[in-house]
DNA sequence: TATTACATGTAACGCGTTACATGATTCG
DNA sequence: CGAATCATGTAACGCGTTACATGTAATA
């Protein structure tokens, strides 16, 4: 009946709506926060996909008038939506091919501006440190006692741990790149951007 | 003159051609191997982009007749191509937004087929182990003495290290997910797929 | 007075995937 | 005799980005 193709965003939306019904705007904010840590989506795209999903019967909407604020369309996941989620969960996820613009740039170091590239590496290291701090604080605040969590909470925690591990390895890589390729211009005097 | 937009694949091709001139077919094989570890591209796409790049003057081609085999078009990077590479290297790389279908699936565990998802995690762990073994062997074979490498070799080694760190963190994550969410059905008897 | 938060969209375009298309040679 | 390697493309389509479009209410 309903054919599920790649349609990556659809599943993220279905999971999010399964957790709690929401408007397109609400989803947009969620995709800037918790879910957005491992899946980005713009509001334009979300509205477009929500429309398509409603046509397909995976979600249903109700117009909700509000005072002093624009009306909102609240979306709910349907039984068909739940079915689609369950079916999707049974298919093995294709392993995402690596796509790192940044790795290309590091490899291209001999053909580029050495200092600029290394400064970029340092900048990225800083970004990794910031996100790490944010994730760790989030983990400590939201999941203080991991043993006491139910399955749903554990699933969320597991994803957060994935983010932490990813940032850690990203940071470790940046540091290794600087060690391997950097003449460490900041170790003896002039420090331009980061890394004390 | 030449406007550089996103055009991610172009840079990967320029770096590859800077290392050594090649035909579209050669590039396709490279994108299945070394470069392909951090940037995937199909031959269809490569031929298309090569055509566009030649029009833009970033690369130039020569038809090379061969015996017993089809003719090939060998592409060389031009001075303009080198300029474009250097300019690109000066722009800070945008930090790639995380996009993990798999993380969505883990988060959606409560709404999906628990056993199927956990089997999928185990399958991915195995895939990580395989790639890790491959990368490590490659590192040991190709870069036996890291101290002795020149800059170009070090850049390649740095990228390979990135792959290794990424696989390690991916594997560690899978193992954590299984610990957190798995009832470890293979720890006491029936072992279906992997993880002894 | 200006910007942020709330709220929902359309249009154009580009990158990447999948399917389709062709044809010679070599190896099992 | 069929499959893999060598070699180069075209066409259709989908997902995602960027720019454009509109309007109210609260806050600084």
Image (cartoon, coloured by chain):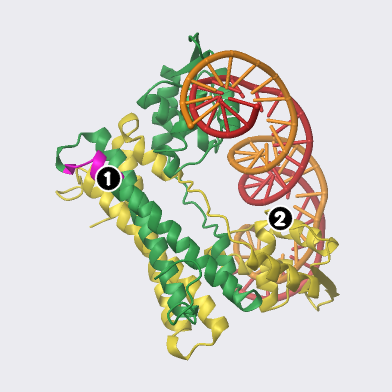
Chain colours: A yellow, B green, C orange, D red
The residue at which mark 1 appears reads as: B139
Q: CA distance from mark 1 to mark 2?
A: 44 Å
The residue at which mark 2 appears reads as: A44
B91 above or below A193? Answer: above
A121 above or below B196? Answer: above
Residue interval drawn in magenta:
B138-146
Q: Is residue B109 magenta?
A: no
At horizontal 33% and vertical 39% (from top left) the residue drawn is: A116
Q: Return the x and y of residue B40 as percentages of the image width and height.
A: 50, 41
Quarter occupied by the C terminus of chain B = bottom left
Q: Secondary structure at mark 2?
A: helix
Q: Dividing the picture into quarters, in which one does residue B194 lie?
A: bottom left
Label 1 neighbour load within 10 Å: few <14, some 14-19, many 20+: some
The answer to whether residue A27 is visible is yes
B97 above or below B30? Answer: below
Q: Secondary structure at mark 1?
A: helix
Q: Return the x and y of residue B65 as percentages of the image width and height.
A: 50, 8
At horizontal 66% and vertical 76% (from top left) the residue drawn is: B111
Please indicate whether residue C15 sits to the left or right of residue B144 in the image: right
């Amino acid at each position: 009946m309903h054919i599920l193709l790649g349609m990556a965003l659809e599943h993220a939306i279905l999971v999010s709506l399964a957790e709690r019904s929401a408007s397109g705007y609400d989803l947009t904010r969620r995709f800037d926060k918790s879910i957005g840590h491992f899946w980005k989506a713009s509001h334009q795209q979300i509205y477009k996909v929500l429309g398509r999903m409603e046509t397909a019967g995976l979600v249903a909407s109700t117009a909700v008038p509000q005072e002093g604020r624009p009306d909102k369309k609240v979306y709910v996941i349907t039984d068909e939506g739940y079915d689609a989620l369950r079916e999707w969960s049974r298919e093995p996820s294709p392993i995402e091919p690596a796509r790192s613009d940044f790795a290309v740039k590091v490899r291209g170091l001999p053909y580029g501006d050495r200092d600029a590239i290394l400064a970029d590496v340092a900048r990225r290291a800083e970004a990794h440190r910031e996100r790490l701090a944010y994730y760790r604080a989030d983990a400590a605040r939201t999941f203080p006692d991991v043993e006491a969590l139910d399955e749903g909470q554990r699933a969320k925690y597991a994803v957060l741990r994935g983010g932490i591990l990813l940032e850690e390895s990203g940071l470790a890589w940046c540091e290794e790149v600087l060690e391997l390729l950097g003449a460490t211009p900041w170790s003896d005097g002039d420090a331009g951007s980061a890394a004390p």
